[in-house]
Image (spheres, helix red, strand yellow):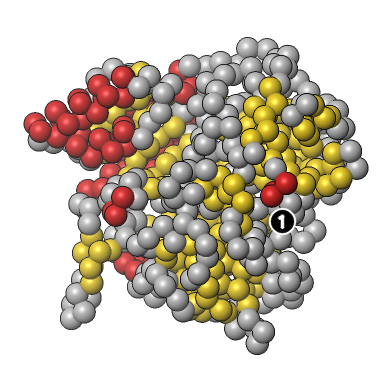
Amino acid sequence: MTRKADRSAPRSTGPVSDRRAQLVAVVVPEPQDAVVLVEREGAGARIAVVCLRAGAKDGRAALERALGAAEGRGCQLHGGISVLDAGDATAALRKVLRSLAPERLSTLDPDPVHTGLDEVSGALSYGVPAAHAEAAAVALDAARAQQAETGRPLHVECLRAERAAGAGVTPRHPAPVNWLSAGFDGRLTAFWPTAAGIVRWYEEVPGGDWHGPELVEGPALAPGLLVIRDPHGLPHLLALRRTARDDGGVDVDVVHAAQYRTGRPLTPWLLLGGPNAAAWQKGREVGFPAAAFDAAGELCVFVRNFGHSVSHRRRTADGTWTPWQHLSGLRVADELVAVTGAHGGVELFALARDTAAVLRWYPGPDGAWTEDRTLPFAARPGSLAPAAEPGALLFRDARTGRACHWRPGTPAPVPLAEPDPGTGPLATAPGVQLGGWGYSLLLGRGTDGGPALGVHPTGRPDTGTWWQETRTPTPGDPSPGVPAAAVGRSGRLSVAARLPGGRLLMADRDEYAEYTEHGAAITLGAWRVVGG
């Protein structure tokens, strides 16, 4: 049952629209390579295409058709197609980016997955041209330099363009889902991956002014991020590091850091390597990490390995790391989600490589991992996320796109009854109080681009989810990723969304509880723009 509450528009603290800041630069080797990237841009995007080379006539014609279709669905084109044709592609691209000042940069996969292996020579073959990785590396270098020069966060998307088995174009590095965190002192911190590394914003005092965005010191990180919380509620960050080798290759390693005090430096980034690090050609294909803490405080990190199965490492409570170990089972795609189960142990969900099926691994009675291939649902790629309840999963139905909740031991998933099915994962915030009862908060993007909030009694999504769209001062402004929320130790609920230009849109809960004729609802105070 859909239960939706219409909210009046809260007052704004000032104008925040910045149309130039919403420009996306599509950087590819040749015009034909830009077609699939242009096709995924939604209404409202301003698109500038930059090609390293002119390419063939039919490729240019295909791109012109894709750009025409983009205009037809509400995109705007920024100038013509730029062709660099320069000896120093990185320097030439830096000059173009300096002129464009984009909010986003969309490019291809710098570390593509192999499609074949010669057992005799060990040579790898790929389903995309080598120019894809070369152009992506140029784009990453130029974007990093652009952000270092301007100080303005630049969001980068590296996209796989194989179009395998109907999967379409998928991100190599996922944007964070639950990226807002509350510290012991009640102050909030927001984290986001950018071209130059992780940036963060944090409150000077609870509910007061914000500091940021500031660049977190660290290695040359790929543009993706996972934010998880330990049993004490402190944020831990996991990412991939890309470093050039003297022999012309690149090492891709999993790295980990933590924030133990709001506003203070993070711990040094710890290099966790990867399960295939002995050979860089294989090691660079490592999937993006998933991780969770068990009830005893042990951290378990999972990745998709070169063979498309799962490998994992564990950090015990005393800080000792186990080596990478193989987890047997079906081959998986680049989509893993780790959760803390109701039993206190860690469980893993993964999208199967060749189907929309979801796989589950959980610790058996003897502590060994047990694989479950019988989950009663199929999920759309890019939609898996941890639910607020222990051991539960959020996803979008493979056929309908509807958001659903599933918990181990239940016969079927529970539809969450969004008023309008969205795309991508839902974020969550547990521990919301309404009328003295506990609720789980769900966050997605509404029809105007602002946050859509849903609540259901904790552990009982089957009783119905009440949804409401919150009208922000910036309707229609595109921003990457889903909104986030956090509940502080005092019970303060805050909701955040990203804006162009390194800014955040923030609102705190205005009233403790409210009930309408539609059911439970969350009342937010005035939206305010912070950072940037």
Q: Which picture quadrant has residue 443?
A: top right
Up-down relation of residue 341 to residue 204 (above or below): below
Up-down relation of residue 294 to residue 490 (above or below): below
Q: Which residue is most to the left? A: 57
Element type where label 1 sits in the image: loop
Q: Is residue 411 left or right of residue 331?
A: right
Up-down relation of residue 355 to residue 57 (above or below): below
Classify the position of the N terminus by image quarter: top right
* Image mark count: 1
Give the residue at x 18% y 81%.
120
- Of 241 and 356, nearer the camera is 356
Read off the residue under disc 1: 389
Q: Which residue is most to the bottom? A: 366
Residue type at mark 1 is Glu
Q: Is residue 107 left or right of residue 527?
A: left
Q: Picture coordinates of residue 108 (x, y %)?
A: 32, 45
Q: Which picture quadrant has residue 234?
A: bottom right
Q: Is residue 300 left or right of residue 65?
A: right
Up-down relation of residue 219 to residue 207 (above or below): below
Give the residue at x 51% y 36%.
422
Q: Picture coordinates of residue 412 (x, y %)?
A: 58, 59
Q: Picture coordinates of residue 6 (x, y %)?
A: 68, 22
Classify the position of the C terminus by image quarter: top right
Give the residue at x 60% y 83%.
368
Q: Count neighbours of disc 1 (C-alpha within 10 A) and say few if under 14, some if 14 to 19, many if 20 or more.
A: many
Q: Which picture quadrant has residue 290?
A: bottom right
Q: Picture coordinates of residue 15 (x, y %)?
A: 63, 12
Can see residue 440?
A: no
Give the residue at x 44% y 50%.
398
